[in-house]
Amino acid sequence: METYDILAFRRQFLLTSGSTDELPGWPVRSMPGGHTLYSHPELGVTVHEDAKTGVTLLLLGFAIDRDRPKATDADLLATLAASRKDGKWWPAFSDLSGRFVLFVFDGDEIEVMHDPCGLRTAEYTFVDGFHVASQSNLLALVAPVGRGKRYREYIGSHYGINVREDHLTADTTLFDGVDRLVPNHVLKAAERVHERYWPVEPLTIGGTPTAEVAAESFEMLRAQIAAAKERFKLALPVTAGQDSRSLLAAASAQLDGIWTYTMLYRWLGDGSPDLTIPASLLGRLEHEHHIFDAKTPPPAEFVERYKANSPMAHPNDATIAYGLTRAFPSEFVGVKGNIAELVRCYYNIDGLPLDIRSVTDITRIIPHWDTVPFIMESMQHWFDATLPVSRELGWDMDLLFHWEHQLGTWQAQSQLEWDIAQEAFTPYNDRRLLVRMLAAAPADRIPPAHELFRTMISHGEGDLLREPINPVLKAERARHFFWRARTRAMRDARKILTPSYSRR
């Protein structure tokens, strides 16, 4: 194998109708329709060729079916191929979790879809052929695409200038001619259409006792971790936070072989609750606690590589990624507690949905998005296509917005950036689990009580609620006070902008 930079586009892919010699050391595979797959050596690649139908399935990354914990990616692709023949493709596909992009080659058609929240990103272009990649810099190796009108609109906007943790809408990129696959949608390349396939059933909120929802959700979360543990060595971060605690609870009876750790980053120090509470929790479970520093500034060459791996990279996070590359065991898959925030009525602390009546209402959720013309155009298209689904099935627009344009962009971008340091598994990235948790009454899902989550945690071993969740030290109270004041002001502004609330 040729010498190559292991960190360059780590765990990424490029599927192209063209070719490139700029990815030395990457395995190359011919795919149907004259396409070529280039994949980083550490990215999982599974192919299933169905002799009866002639359909070829390509899975990049990994898929999980918690009801079949011993099923491999090859097993899951075989099941999907069979479901395509008997008309049960979408139910079978929608039940998968994990972190993956799936290609279906069926005659002249190529379909592309991914995991529930799109945590394995897929950007695509039809310029000089059909090309799909983890991000736009790879597409630029095989097609004449680059930063142009969109980029100028973005960097000249109030949003692009002033927002530190910036992100785009789920279907856009900074490259003209390059679009992005949205969670819950399928790209049909031959038709050049991008269609929603989920949700397909009404969302039922309330009506089920929270204790029952919590018990069932806990078992589903436990099964997710058990299924992943069959496939990988898992590394579980433990903090003082709620999402971390819920994962520890779900893993508490199966901790053998799981590497538990806390990393010190940003303002965290030796006396931080994010260090002392995990030590107490893991001590009670008699499990080893690893601690490592992620505050050491990375060398300039690492920062440059971090930035080059994605056009939307956030250099301020390179320090944490660098700490992970130095201390995180490379043979392990990191477990992440993200996505759980979808359940917590994220945009409104009273538990009621925002009354979204126009695209202006939806774009105001992210301050200053309305200063970027191509973002407004994207959101108008999404709003027009999604509003009928929302009304028919009872999925609130702000919930679908959070799922697809917050988790499917900001969180997916975060995981793409940290691919330089670790592969990630997110147990909450599971449609059936999220739907079940959303069935609990909103009053039991919102702060400060978070009754649903606390009840789930109570099902774990080791009395994990004995330690407080996210306590605030005296030295941190001022920072938390100003953060809460800012959050309240933003939420109050949203209420003024969208003053009436209703659950349709």
Image (tube, rainbow, N blue to C red):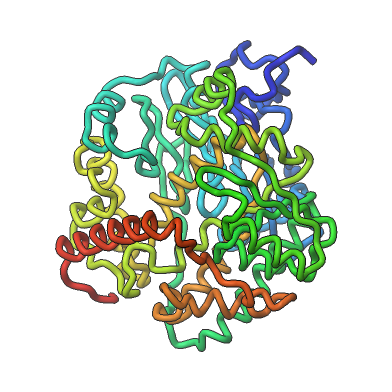
| Nearest the eye: 308 or 504 | 308
Q: Quadrant of residue 66?
A: bottom right
Query: Where does the image place residue 447, in percent across and percent down from the top left?
Result: 41, 72
| Nearest the eye: 281 or 167 | 281
Is residue 405 left or right of 93 when viewed as pictured?
Answer: left
Query: Where does the image place residue 40, in percent across and percent down from the top left?
Result: 68, 27
Quarter of the image with the N terminus is top right
Q: Where is 103 relative to 154, above or below?
A: below
Q: Quadrant of residue 395?
A: bottom left
Q: Quadrant of residue 145?
A: top left
| Nearest the eye: 64 or 267 | 267
Residue pictured at 47% horizontal, 22% vertical: 129
Query: Where does the image place residue 70, in percent across and percent down from the top left?
Result: 81, 59
Is residue 391 left or right of 224 when viewed as pictured?
Answer: left
Number of numbered discs: 0
Q: Where is 46 relative to 38, above or below?
A: below
**Furthest residue to the front?**
474
Residue pictured at 70% horizontal, 15% vertical: 4
Residue pictured at 52% horizontal, 16% vertical: 141
Quarter of the image with the C terminus is bottom left
Query: Where does the image place residue 296, in percent across and percent down from the top left?
Result: 60, 32
Q: Taking the image as drawn, is residue 431 in sight? A: yes
Q: Taking the image as drawn, is residue 111 in sight? A: no
Q: Where is 300 relative to 469, above or below?
A: above
